[in-house]
Image (tube, rainbow, N blue to C red):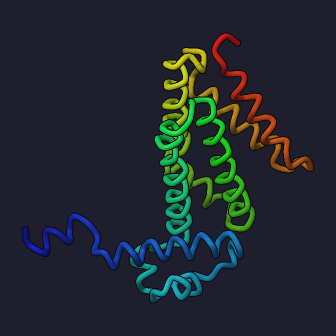
Amino acid sequence: MSDVTRSARRPRADAARNRAAILDAARTAFTAAGEDASLEAIARSAGVGIGTLYRNFPTREELVAAVYASELDAVLATVPALLARHTPDVALRAFLDTYAGFIATKRGMAESVRAGAIRSAAESADTRRRVNEAVGLILAAGAERGVFRAGTAADDVTAAMIGVFLTTANSADPGQTGRLLDLLVRGLAAGE
């Protein structure tokens, strides 16, 4: 295989490192400074030139979408390990906590970066379908092991989870989200 063919199939190691460094720097900058985050400062923090940033992410919106997708991928990737280490009910509760942290970070980012950019990022990442798949894996494992009732729709659990996050977003009680997520998981128990 020629070097040209090999490079067309996957990015060079330095290009992949640059992209990862840009995403890390952008995540930090958007969370801290929001819309005021300068792309030049992000490039500098990543240790790359502005041209490298623009080659990877031609617009600010594409950079926001990439940060969102990268973080969503990390959250969803926890599911197999959670199921391998825990019973399905404990795995679901741990996943809900991880996803709650993701939502809290995105909420802060959405308040400081144009909300439309976050909404567009969520749509382009196919978030709802992918979260439903992750929740569905946990529900199926739970039903198979007799922990969760069979036939629960993953989208119903996802909708309830989103409802908890929306209704507790401005709660003065920091423990309310956790208590509601506990209720959600207990409500899925077989025999309930």
Q: Residue 102 location, x and y as percent? A: 64, 53
Quadrant of the drawing holding the C terminus:
top right
Name the residue rendered at 66%, 32% in the picture: 159
Along the viewing direction, whichever of 38 and 98 lies nearer the viewer: 98
Name the residue rendered at 31%, 75% in the picture: 13
Q: Indicate left or right for 130 with 102 as reference.
A: left
Q: Indicate left or right for 174 with 87 as reference.
A: right
Quadrant of the drawing holding the N terminus:
bottom left
Q: Residue 65 location, x and y as percent? A: 53, 61
Q: Residue 73 location, x and y as percent? A: 49, 52
Along the viewing direction, whichever of 190 and 74 lies nearer the viewer: 190
Residue at the right extreme, as displayed = 172
Residue at the top extreme, as displayed = 191
Name the residue rendered at 25%, 66% in the picture: 10
Quarter of the image holding residue 71? bottom right
The relative height of residue 172 versus residue 93 in the rendered view (above or below) is below
Quarter of the image holding residue 150? top right
Total number of numbered labels? 0
Quarter of the image holding residue 42? bottom right
Name the residue rendered at 56%, 28% in the picture: 154
The relative height of residue 55 versus residue 93 in the rendered view (above or below) is below
The relative height of residue 148 versus residue 82 in the rendered view (above or below) is above
Q: Indicate left or right for 168 with 137 as reference.
A: right
Residue at the front extreme, as displayed = 85
